[in-house]
Image: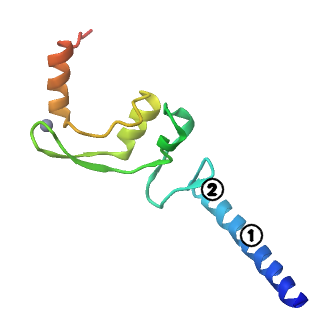
């Protein structure tokens, strides 16, 4: 019984060591965001630069999102880079999802706010 227990402890310690090594490898590869593992091939987010109402809405990474425009029905892609800029630099609404293509969005904004002033 005693031997079995110590074997269990050894096994656990080995697993912990393996997990630590795995996490440090992930961190080196830029795949650890705020202690959360992100999938390979995605764009890492900076949760501290986002504006979010609750922890559950925070984004740890971005990946391209395909959508269909509600106006003209055109298919488009909201790229990971665009999302990062929108959520972290422009401090966009974290719950926003792509709904309008660039052209329809501009048309809507124009209708709502009038032409943008140009310098
Ligand atoms: Zn459209």
Q: What residue is shown with label 1?
A: 16
Name which of mark 2 and mark 1 comes first in the sequence: 1
Number of disc labels: 2
Q: Nearer the viewer, residue 98 or 89?
A: 98
Left or right, 70 with respect to 51, comes to left
Q: Residue furthest right?
A: 2
Label 1 sits on a secondary structure element that is helix
Give the image location of residue 31, x and y in percent: 55, 56
For the point 65% across and 67% down, the residue is: 22
Give the image location of residue 27, x and y in percent: 63, 56
For the point 15% across and 39% down, the residue is: 70
Left or right, 72 with respect to 102, comes to left
For the point 14% across and 18% down, the residue is: 111
Left or right, 113 with respect to 12, comes to left
Give the image location of residue 90, x and y in percent: 41, 27
**Figure check: 10 above or below 110:** below
The image quadrant that residue 72 belongs to is top left
Q: What residue is shown with label 2?
A: 27
Quadrant including the C terminus: top left
Q: Nearer the viewer, residue 55 or 74?
A: 55
Q: Residue furthest left?
A: 72
For the point 61% across and 47% down, the residue is: 34
Q: Nearer the viewer, mark 2 or mark 1?
A: 1
> Quick check: which quadrant has ligand 1?
top left
Mark 1 surroundings within 10 Å by alpha-carbon count, few (fewer than 14), some (14 through 19), many (20 or more): few
């Amino acid at each position: 019984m005693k031997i079995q227990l110590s074997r269990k402890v050894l096994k656990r310690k080995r697993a912990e060591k393996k997990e630590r090594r795995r996490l440090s490898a992930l961190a080196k590869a830029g795949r650890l965001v705020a202690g959360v593992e992100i999938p390979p091939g995605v764009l890492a987010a900076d949760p501290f630069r986002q504006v979010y109402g609750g922890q559950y809405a925070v984004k740890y990474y971005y990946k391209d999102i395909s959508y269909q425009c509600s106006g003209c029905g055109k298919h488009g892609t909201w790229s990971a880079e665009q999302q990062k800029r929108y959520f972290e630099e422009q401090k966009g609404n974290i719950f926003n999802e792509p709904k309008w293509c660039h052209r329809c969005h501009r048309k809507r904004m124009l209708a709502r706010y009038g032409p943008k002033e140009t310098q």
